Amino acid sequence: MSVEEAAGQLAGAIKETASWKSFQEATAEFEQDRVVSALFQEYRQLLAELQQAHGQGSPPSPDETQRLEQLQTRIQSSPVYQKREVAANGMIADLVTANLLLSEQLGFDFATNAMPPKSGGCCGGGENGGNGSCGCG
């Protein structure tokens, strides 16, 4: 059996778990909620604008920061967001368990060693698509 075949089997097994199915269902509900989707879109837009301004040396105004925090609070207080977070935590717990079992059998931390190398620093400079405008990339 090849690594690719084994990975496919592992992915298939993960997709059959209750935690994966619960997360997929909760994510679909989150994405279909029009109010939360609109808030999330506004949050992402404002965040992108503030990050771009920061990259150009312009800190956010207190009003902008307050608006961002208000949007975040409204999103996080919604039942669909909270359901998605609970489901995500359950799925992550299962994935952590899988990593521990793989790591034990292999003799090294599987997840850490399977990650692609990072580059570019906190702003995502280099191959992550950002420009490293804060000087880190």
Image (cartoon, grey):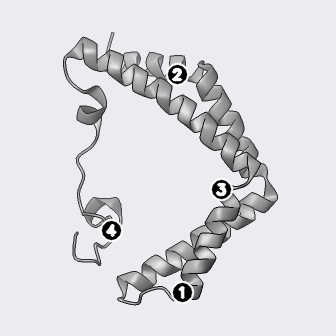
**Quadrant the N terminus occupies:** top left
Which comes before the other along the chain, label 1 or label 3? Answer: 1
Which comes before the other along the chain, label 3 or label 4? Answer: 3
Q: Residue at x 57, y 83 (%)?
A: 64
Q: Is residue 70 above or below residue 103?
A: below
Q: Is residue 63 above or below residue 93?
A: below
Residue 82: image x %, image y %? Answer: 67, 46
Circle 1 sits in a helix, a strand or a loop, which is it?
Answer: helix
Which residue in the rendered view is the most extreme toward the left?
107
Q: Residue at x 54, y 86 (%)?
A: 62
Q: Residues within 10 Å of mark 1 (few under 14, many from 20)?
A: few
Which residue in the structure is indicated by mark 1? 62
Give the quadrant of residue 113.
Answer: top left
Which residue in the structure is indicated by mark 3? 76
Circle 3 sits in a helix, a strand or a loop, which is it?
Answer: helix
Residue 40 appears in the picture as rendered = no
Q: Residues within 10 Å of mark 3 (few under 14, many from 20)?
A: some
Which residue in the structure is indicated by mark 4? 123
Which comes before the other along the chain, label 1 or label 4? Answer: 1
Q: Residue at x 65, y 27 (%)?
A: 21
Observer-nearest residue: 9 or 103?
A: 103
Label annotation for residue 14: 2
Q: Amino acid at mark 4?
A: Cys
